[in-house]
Image: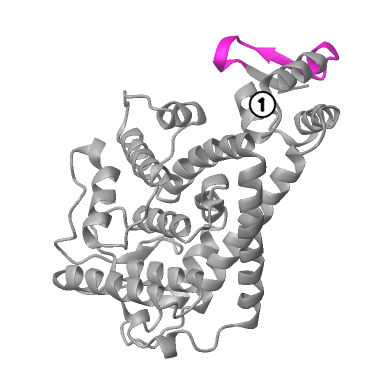
Amino acid sequence: MHSFVDLDRTFAGQPPALGALLTVIDTGRGQERVFADQMPELLKQLSEHARIASITASNAIEGVVLDTRRAEQIAEGSPRFRSRNEKEFAGYRDAIDVLLRLEAYEPLSVPFVLHLHRLLFHHVGGRGGYLKTEDNFIVSCETGARQAVFTPPPWRRTEFLLAELFDRYNDAKRERRANPLVLLSALILDFLAIHPVADGNGRLARLLTTYELLAQGYGVARYVSIEQRIYESKNTYYASLYESQRDWHEGEHSIWPWTSYLARVLADAYADFENRVASAEQVSGGKQDRAREYILRQSPADFRKRDLERALPGISPATIRLILNELRDLGAIRLEGSGPGARWHRV
C-alpha cells in the first residue's frame, strides 16, 4: 500500500515518454469502441484466441506448461486432468472466464481476491482462498541458485495491508488522482510487494490487471493477450518490478520503471489489435492472398487448420480450407493424419 500513502510524492516526476504512451493507449481505446460497433464477429474471434493465449501464457510464466493440444482441450473445458499442471491450468481458465463474463465491476476487496485465488486452486485440492500464514520471499534464479530479491511484509500484517491497499486505491480512482493506468500500475506493484498468498501471487496480479483494465474501459484485454506479451518480455517484467520495489518498505521507491513497462505492453497490445482489425477488413480476394502468404512465409512449419483460423481472424474456415487444398495440390504443403488433429507441413 506504500505507493498510496503519499500520492503527491508517488506521482511526482512522471517521465515525459510515459505521457506519450498513455496518449497512444487512450487513442487506441477510442478506436476499440468503433471496432466493437462495426465488427462484432471479428472481435468475438479475437476474444477466444486471446483467452486461450492468456491462460497459456500466465501459467507458463510460473512454469506451468502443457503441450499445445492439451492446453486447447483444457481451455475449451475438458473435465479430465492428467497432471497437476493441467489442474492449475484449468484453475486459471475458470478465474479468467469469471472476469470475462462480468457485466458490472465492483470496487476491489480482499474477499474478491480470495475468491479468484480459490478458483485458481480449486482443482488441486482446495488450497486456494486463504491469505498466507507464514512469511514468504520473492526469489530469482538468474545466478543458477535461488536468491531472495525482495522480502514482503510479515505475514501477520497481510490482511491489514491488503485491505488498506484496496481502500486507498479505490479512493484514488474515485477521486481521479492520476491517470487510471498509473493508478493500476501502483496497485499491482504494491500487491506484489505485499505478496499476500502462499502460491499464485503472480497469476492473481495478472487477473487483477485484466479486471481493472476491463473495469476502466480498456477492452483490449479481451482481444489481445496481455499475459502473452508479459511472457514474451518476462525478463523486462521482472527487472522493472525489482527496480520499482527497491526502497518500497521505506516508501521511497519509484513506480515509474514498472509503470513504463506496463504502459509499453498496453500500447503494443493496442497496436497489434488495430493491425489485426485492419488486416481483416480486406476484401475476399485479399483474404485469400493473406492466408496464402501467412501459410507459406509466416506460419510455423508444422501447424493445424485450427492454428490458422486463430492466427487469421476475419478469414472464414472455408477460405482457409480452399487455400490449404490449393497449396497441397501445388506441392507446397502436405497433410499428415485426419480429423481435428491432422497436421500440415510446409515442404
Quarter of the rendering containing residue 340:
top right
Q: Is residue 98 above or below residue 268?
A: above
Q: Residue 74: x and y, percent?
A: 40, 29
Q: Is residue 328 left or right of residue 232?
A: right
Residue 66 seen: yes
Does 50 sit above or below residue 258? above
The type of residue carrying mark 1 is Asp
Q: What SS does tag 1 mark?
A: strand
Using residue 126 as the reference point, say whether residue 317 is left or right of it.
Answer: right
Residue 314 found in image quarter: top right
**Going 61% across and 76% down the picture, which residue do you hit?**
18
Q: Is residue 331 magenta?
A: yes
Question: Which residue is drawn at the image coordinates 64% and 28% (left, top)?
Answer: 309
Residue bearing the label numbered 1: 302
Question: Residue 177: image x %, image y %?
Answer: 44, 80
| Residue that appears at 84% across and 32% down | 286
Give the magenta-colored segment's residue range. Answer: 327-342
Q: Quadrant of the C terminus?
A: top right
**Quick check: can you spot residue 151?**
no
Horizontal relation, residue 172 to residue 57: left or right: left
Residue 119 vertical position relative to residue 310 in the rendered view, above or below: below
Q: Residues within 10 Å of mark 1 (few under 14, many from 20)?
A: some
Magenta residue check for 138: no
Q: Quadrant of residue 164?
A: bottom left
**Percent x, y for residue 306?**
60, 24
Q: Looking at the image, which residue is at 48% across and 29% down? A: 72
**Count of marks placed on residues:** 1
